[in-house]
Image: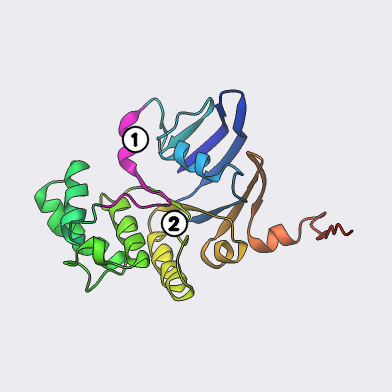
Amino acid sequence: MIQVRNLTRYYGEFAALRDVSFDLKEGEIVGLLGLNGAGKSTTLKVLAGLLAPSVGSVVIDGLDLHTNPLVRARIGYLPEDPPLYVEMTTTAFLRHIGRIKGMSAAELDRRVPEVIRLADLGGREHQVIGTLSHGYRKRVGIAQSVINAPKLVILDEPISGLDPAQIVEMRKVVRNLGTNRAVILSSHILSEVSATCDRILVIGGGKLVAQGTEAELVSRPGTDAQLVITVR
């Protein structure tokens, strides 16, 4: 469904990504794991069409994302800090985003209740976004990312800033997203990625250094832990 090939992105002379390749399948939830500065957000922005690759391609349903701009309509994107209009209610905001994405009033009448259920926002439909907790704002961000039923959903650090109870609830929301679309999310926390995702992509220094299930990654040769201590 989604093929990423030889993705490379330069900022000046600095290579934030170098020759990254992987595939995503429908119904699959994939975690992009790496430390801060590893290249996770740059990868997701290229996948979302917000950055053009210096080299390489992103192909969705056989169409190259960066030569076919209309392919962006098949992508839903949630940045780490959701861009919300805090003075609007949840429903009004979702309808506004849907109109921006070209949806008709009839489509919105059908789709808004669906994404409210999908993001577990029941009881918050008519609440002003500015009065919602951080966790519920994240859910509103997820709801807007899937309002037009995209084929690919991209979530940048969806659990960032959430408390333990909210993290458990967010896992359920993310799993629900993966029933009929491809989902890729980023995190620097292995336990959260392994608890939510079917497969893990490990990125470091702008390169894809490993991929597979948690069991496959742990069983790889040369994965023994090393502890380096400097003392005076």
Q: In the rendered image, which quarter is residue 136 located in? A: bottom left
Q: Within the magenta stretch, is there residue 79?
A: yes
Residue 225, position in %: x, y? 80, 60
Residue 169, position in %: x, y? 41, 72
* Local SS, label 2: loop
Q: Is residue 61 above or below residue 119?
A: above
Task: Identify the amino acid type marked 2.
Answer: Gly
Outermost residue on the bottom side: it is 165
Residue 95, position in %: x, y? 17, 53
Q: In the rendered image, which quarter is residue 128 located in? A: bottom left
In this figure, which residue is indicated by the disc labeled 1? 71
Q: Within the magenta stretch, is there residue 189?
A: no
Q: Residue 137, which numbered label?
A: none
Q: Nearer the viewer, residue 59 or 159?
A: 159
Q: Left or right: 97 with respect to 211?
A: left
* Local SS, label 1: helix
Q: Quadrant of the N terminus?
A: top left
Q: Quadrant of the C terminus?
A: bottom right
Task: Identify the amino acid type marked 1.
Answer: Val
Which residue appears at 34% of the width and 37% of the height?
A: 72
In this figure, which residue is indicated by the disc labeled 2? 27
Q: Left or right: 11 with respect to 27?
A: right
Q: Nearer the viewer, residue 224 or 111?
A: 224
Q: Left or right: 98 with respect to 26?
A: left
Q: Which residues are magenta?
A: 68-84
